[in-house]
Every structure is written in C-alpha cells, then in structure tokens.
Amino acid sequence: MSFAQIVQYTFSGITVGSIYAITAVCFNIIYNCTGIINFAQGEFLIIGAMTAISLSHVVPLPLAIVGAVAVTTVIGGLIEIVFIRRVSDASILRLIVITIGLSIVMREGMLHIWDEKVRSLPYFTGSAITTVSILGAHISPQVLWVLGVSAVIVTALTLFFRLTTTGRAMRACADNRMAARLCGINDRWMVTLSFMLSAGIGALAGCVISPVTQTQYDMGAPLAIKGFTVAILGGLGNSMAAVVAGLFLGLLEAFVVSQFAAAYKEVVAIAVLLLILIFRPSGLFARRDVTALRTA
Amino acid sequence: METRAARIFCILMVVLALVLPGCKEAETPPAQETAPIKVGAILAVTGPASFLGAPESKTLEMLTEKINKSGGVNGAKIELTIMDSGANPEKAISMAKQLIDEKKVLAILGPSTSGETMAIKNICQEGETILLSCAAAETIVNPVASYVFKTPQKDSDAARRIGQTMKDMGITKIGVVTSNAGFGVAGGKQLAAIIPEYGITIAIAETYDKQETDLTGVLTKLKGEDVQAVVNWSIVPAQSLVAKNMKQIGLNVPLFQSHGFGNIKYVEAGGEAANGTIFPAGRLLVADALADDHPQKKVLTEYKTDYESRHQEDASTFGGHAYDALTILVEGIRKAQSTETAKVRAAIETLQGVVGTGGVFNFSADDHNGLDRNAFEMLTVKDGKFAIYQK
C-alpha cells in the first residue's frame, strides 16, 4: 500500500471511529450516573439529525443545528422524567429493557414524522464533490468537521466533569449515589442532566455526521450497538478509554477492508472484540475494581 | 288503562305495528350487477422496501379508480384489496393464503420484493391464482410457472446494456461494488457472468453491508486497482453514498448504477456527485424527452401527470411496475372475455404489444416477463435531472 493509501484508510478509520467514540462516551455518561445502558442512544443521534434537516429548510444551518440539539436535549430529559424516574425501585435490567422499548417507539415515531426517505444535512462547508488533499489522501471537508467537533466535545466534557461544580456533582453521583445525596446533591436532577447531556451530544454528533453518512430513520440501532461495543471495549464507565477504543475499532475496520474482502469487515472487527473480551473481560482499560455491572 | 278508548287505541297500535312492516312495498330487486372482479395486492407499503411498495400501492389505487370510473372491465368493476407485507416473506405467505383461500381473488399483484415473490410463487401456482409480480429477480419466471408472471425488466438485460455502453466507451477494466441484499447479490452474479462477454475485466468486486454508512474504504481499494469505471448494484441509500464517496476520495471515473436508481430523490440525495451517473431504466423518467411518436409516450406522460398531480411527489419507475401488472391483467381479462382464472392466464400468455411503463410487453408460454433489453433506455444525470444518455 502506498503512503497516500495508508493515509486514506486512516482518515476513513478515524472518521467512523470518532462517531463510535462519541456514542460510547454518551453511553458512559448515563452509565456512570445511573448504571443503565441507554439503548435508545442511537435514536438521539438520528432525531438530532432529522430535526436539524427539517429546521434547515426554515432557518440557516447553524441555527438549525442549535435548535436540533436543544430539542433533542429536551426529549432526553423528558424521557428520563417520564419513563426512568417513575420506575423508582426497578432493577437495572428492567430499566435497560425499558430503554430498548423506548428506542423502538422513537424509531416508529420518526418513521411517522419523517417517513422512510434517506435525507442528509447540507455539507457544512463545500458540497458533495468538494475534496481536500491531505498528505496525498483526498477527503471531504466534512470529515475534518467530524474530527474537529468530536475533539471539541471530548475536551469540553472532560473540562466539564473536572472543573465545574455540576460536573463534579455528577461524578459524585456516579461514585456513590447515596453519599452524594447526603452531601446535598440533588441526585435525581443529576440523572436527568445525564440523559439531557447524552441526548444533546448525540444530536450534535448526528448532525455533523449526517452529510457524510446520510440519515435514515432506522440508522440508530446499528449505531447504538457499535457504540455499546466500543464502550465495553474501552471498559464500561471510562470515557477516555471509550475514545481510544472507538478510534481503534474504526481504524481496525478500515484496515480490514484494505486487506480482506470488504464483506468481512464486521466479522474481523467483532472477532477481535471477542478476543479482547476473553482475555480482558472488563475491557482494554478497565480498572481492576470495576468488573461488575454496577447496581447502585 | 283508564278508558276503553285508550285500550282500543293501544290494541290498534300493536296490530298496526305487526301488520305494517309486512305491507311495505316490495323492495326493488337489486340491479343486475356483474360480479366485481376480485384482485388482491401484496405490497411492501411500509418497512424497508416502502420506496417500492408505497408508490406501487398509490398507483394501483389510482389506476383501479380510473378503470372503474370508465365502466370497469367488460362491465365489471375491479374490487382491489391491498395488503401491506412490510417486505416480510412470512407475512406475504399468510397474506397470499388469505387472498387465495378466503377472498378467492382472480389474481395477486405484487409482491414488491423478490424474496417475498419466491416465497409465494408455489402457493400461487398450486392455488391456481395468477401472480403478477412487481419484483425483479430472474428466478421468478425462470423456471416458468404457468400462473406466475413479472413486470420489471430483467437484471441480465440491465447488465447487458451497461456492458454495451462501457464497450462503446472503450472501457476495459472495471470495479464492481454490490450490496449484500438480495437485489445486490443477484446483480453481482449477473455482472460477473455478462460483463466479460463485452471484453471487459472485472478487476475487483466487493460486497458491502446494505446498511453501510461509509464506503470510502471500499472505494479506496477500487482506486488502488486503477479501474476505469465503477458499477454499483444496490438500492438506496448506498447508491447516493457511492457517488459522493467516489468524488470525495478523488475516484473520478464514470459511475454506472443499476435500474434501482429510478427515482429523482436519489439524484437529490447525491447532490452534485450524482451528475454523470449512467444507468439503464424504464423510459418513465424521461417521458417528456421522448419523441411524440414513441409507442410508450402517451402511457408514460399520462401516468406521470396523473401520479404527480394526485400525490404531490415524483413518479418513479417502481410504481410503474404495479401499473403494468394491473394493465396486463385487465388486457388479459378483456382478451379472454371471461374472469375464469385459467382462461385469463392463457390469454395473458398470448398478449402482444401491450404498452406499459416498463416497456412494450410481448408474452409467450416460455416468456412470462415479456420484455427484452430494449425496454431499457440508458439514462444519465445532467444538472440534477434525468436525461437520455447520448454517446
């Protein structure tokens, strides 16, 4: 393979890898706060993209994206308040099944509102045929947007959790919910906030990836599964690891395509995942003490 | 009761109540109506193949209304029952049984997809019910089952037209990408068998998942093989994705698509990247550009105008397949002058020169599709619109 080809495949890999990473980060936010795996996460990305597409007919693109993120954030919060909060003493498994049910309802809802057509947001810069050349590889400028936005999201989240009071409060909830409550943190509001944050970030990711991958009402589920895979791969609950794992999986898939028949892409990626999980069941970067699904 | 008068009044009322109903004028006997012709349709109106089933369903309703308004067929109205299978073969099977055993339909139009059609092919053959499928697979009519017909053009003819066009362009080395769904797999096989006949080598053939969202990896591989053209055989959304990804990674060679590209929405989805795509399709998409004396012009422009004004959306070749199915059935009934299944079936086999949206149909006992490669027109995309491909 020539150097230009290697760069080309690398770009392919990190583009799709960063979307996996963002989805996994969103899984981790909710998991950390509540112990729930939110299988409706994929739908948040798609709702965000679809809303932005509808709004973009009425308002300029940046406003449409802001509006879509706002709407999806509200939806995320409502889902938590209406469905998750009421089931106060349910087991984690029951809540997870509820999120699966929610993802189905949201998918059908999207089908009714937007029908089955494939749509996409306009390219942020350029058009369907613009291409920039970097180190011999040709990519759409939208790819740079995806990488840039993902990096900004991860950095902003890290700063949020580390430096702001609310972020620290959420981490406190994640560590020990009862203790956090005793410290005066409103843990129920933290849970709602975690859903809203996940939904909003998901929506932003959905918007930025929409010109590249196109958006269809049922794209949420495969995305959620990949994101969940990446979250497990990095170690559930560890967001930085999720980013690394996401990029790793994306690159793995891209280079598998370069060497083997493209049809085997999923097979090899999942096989590697299985191997890693057999030898390191908690994921690549898990801390030794966090090995069971938390039940707090 | 207080008074005798009141008592008599009550008795009178009761007597009248018992007698009057019997004195009603004898109802006019029901008008001598010819029994309606029962036609069933199994279409994927919702679900993953709704881009096929939804226009097909709308087309059938529209055409049935039109036929019934102008007096029906041989004086009898068509009674159409559309069932939504969601492209699910199991549902199609139970719907077919319902239509054949309970509703006792004369014919079933559809299903929309090849998978469903193959699932019910034997049921219809054994149930002696005419099946006019709107799905494309060769295996539907090959081997021929006497009651089973299909209206879409042949995959192999599409591959041949593509091969011929590439040969005329002097292309000798191509890359083929296909989706892993039934349509893509079937197309891949046809291409592998037919393209070499035109002196063209397939340097690389790759399959991708139908839900794939990024094809830059696969196309980079093709670019590495220095192909002179790319053939993509899939349905939406991969069709627009291939076009966009090719331009973005700098693979600037002609892109050929299958006849699954037959809707202007896919051109819109591809944006500027769709310009220059070459593909075989029914002439519906360029109906306005046809010469006035073209045999299909009248049918096509009428269908297009009716559909677009009624449904506020662009007509696609897919809805046309259902139009053709019903048209052929109606012609068969007219020719047979009967609604007996066996007679209509035999009549359909003798139909010649039936002008449809997909082409001009000529049936025979061996040919239950009725179309040859001339049913296709090679089209291209210019400035976001369909145009006839000129060399």
Image (cartoon, coloured by chain):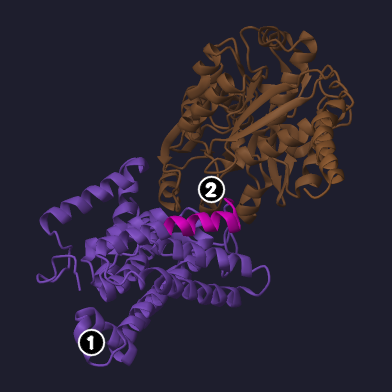
Q: Which residue is mark 2?
A: B237
Q: Is residue A147 left or right of residue B111?
A: left
| Residue A214: % across, % down | 52, 57
Asked if both marks, 1 and 2, belong to the same chain, the answer given is no
Q: Going by the image, does B125 lie left or right of B390?
A: left
Magenta segment, which residues?
A103-117
The amino acid type found where label 1 is placed reads Ala
Seen from the viewer's position, the closer of residues B81 and B25 is B25
The residue carrying mark 1 is A180
Image quarter of residue A296: bottom left
Q: Which mark is residue A172?
A: none
Q: Say above or below: A177 vs A231.
A: below
Question: Hue of chain A?
Answer: purple
- Of residues A137 and B6, which is closer to you in this image? B6
The image shows a total of numbered marks equal to 2
Indicate the colour of chain B.
Answer: brown
